[in-house]
Amino acid sequence: MKRKFYNILMEWKNKNINTPLMVVGARQIGKTYIIDEFCKNEFEDYIYINLMEKQSIVNIFEENIDFETKVRKLELELNKKIIPEKTIVFIDEIQESEKAISSLKAFCESNLNYKIICAGSLLGVKISRFKSSFPVGKVQIEFMYPMDFEEFLIALDKEMWVNEIKRCYDNLEEISIHEKLIDMYRTYLCIGGMPAAILEYKNVNEDILLWNKNILRNIVLSYLADMNKYTLNNNESVKIEKVYNTIPSVLAKENKKFKYSDIEKGANKRRFESAIDWLEASEMVYKCKYINKVEPPLKAYVKEDNFKLYLSDIGLLTSLLEIEFSEILLNKNFLFKGAITENYVAQAFRTNNISLYYWNSGNKAEIDFLLYNKDGIIPVEVKAGDNTQSKSLNVFNEKYNPKYSIRLSTKNFGFNNGIKSIPLYATFCIK
């Protein structure tokens, strides 16, 4: 399936520099697949190394020997010559060896112009807890995410629809296939952006009734297994799992601010902060931070103890909530409707490298997301349906007078009273 991340890989290649590329992202989002496709398509010679399966390679990286000797031993073990001008080396599951990560510095500084890509499960956690000398400035780090709604449509051979969405977004012009796109958006809420889930949907000829829900359940189970494998001890993994399982119920509340007391009675920051940090570093959750002053740069006015947590994939959230798909597809009113919609937007924003911030004024008003771009600070209001009445947006606009506002809902494109109406399915267009 086509991934936009391929463009990032091509940009790295076209720079023609020897800085190794490190791809960071959650498990099962398609990192190995797309890097493997890239290496096969774009290079004359390709070496794939999986450190989880090749302990002998890990042992070579762990040896206290000079870099040239290490490369020679790698070639002997692989029975293949690494030709810098022709060969791309993809080191998968590189988190299995800190010494392999440290060796990226030597690859970068070599005058032979080696081409190295690495990826792995929970690399973000590994980096945050690195004990050796991390090759700062010697590695290009890029983040990869689950497939967004644009990629979902492309995977279903609807690239023409994507182009029309982009055209109507640029011109704020109503789109003729609005209802069809709303139906597709609701299907995406059920399935999410994990490649295996979308591929299964294609394989059953886009019949949601035949789609296998166990795919997402198994991904959640694999995430929980990672918590046990890549944590310092069993006590830490228990705390991480508790936080992860708490997020869906917190999002269902009217006040979605995450409170430690939601995890268990007597819970506090000191006990659970590291668990949240682990989930953030793993890219399994996204933190949306509260801004107590609406002035640029927004990052300077973050109140660290006030935040919301969203899951990395909307399909995983829907799975954890155990919602019947008919509730979503038939647009019924149900408790978690707002939570699912907000999580979808947070995921889309994060995929576009938009930092997640929100604002409120006590009990009077709350703005779901704030953007900071060339037009200044822009409020983004998220509506699950087509009821677009909003006291909160009015309060914010009167107080801060932004150049315009954005309202995401199930309504068609439009622009009235300084508010850009953007259909939820076009959230991927917001940069």
Image: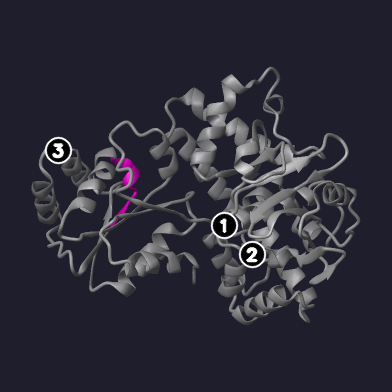
Of the two numbered discs 3 and 2 in the rendering, the one whose residue sits closer to the viewer:
2
Residue 196 on image: x %, y %: 52, 61
Residue placed under numbered mark 1 in the picture: 351
Q: Name the secondary structure under disc 3.
A: loop
How far apart marks 2 and 1 lie (CA) works out to: 8 Å
Quadrant where the image shows the C terminus: bottom right
Q: Which residues are magenta?
A: 90-97
Q: Which label's residue is closer to the chain start, 3 or 2?
A: 3
- The residue located at (12%, 62%) in the rendering is 81
Q: Which label's residue is closer to the chain start, 2 or 1?
A: 1
Q: Which label's residue is closer to the chain start, 3 or 1?
A: 3
Q: Name the secondary structure under disc 2.
A: helix
Residue placed under numbered mark 2 in the picture: 428
Query: Residue 229 lies in what quarter of the image?
Result: top left
Crowdedness of circle 3 by 10 Å Cα count: few (<14), some, many (20+)? few
Crowdedness of circle 2 by 10 Å Cα count: few (<14), some, many (20+)? many
Given residues 390 and 195, the one toward you in this image is 390
Give the amino acid at mark 2. Phe
Give the amino acid at mark 3. Glu
How far apart marks 3 and 2 lie (CA) works out to: 46 Å
Residue 91 sits inside the magenta stretch: yes
Residue placed under numbered mark 3 in the picture: 63
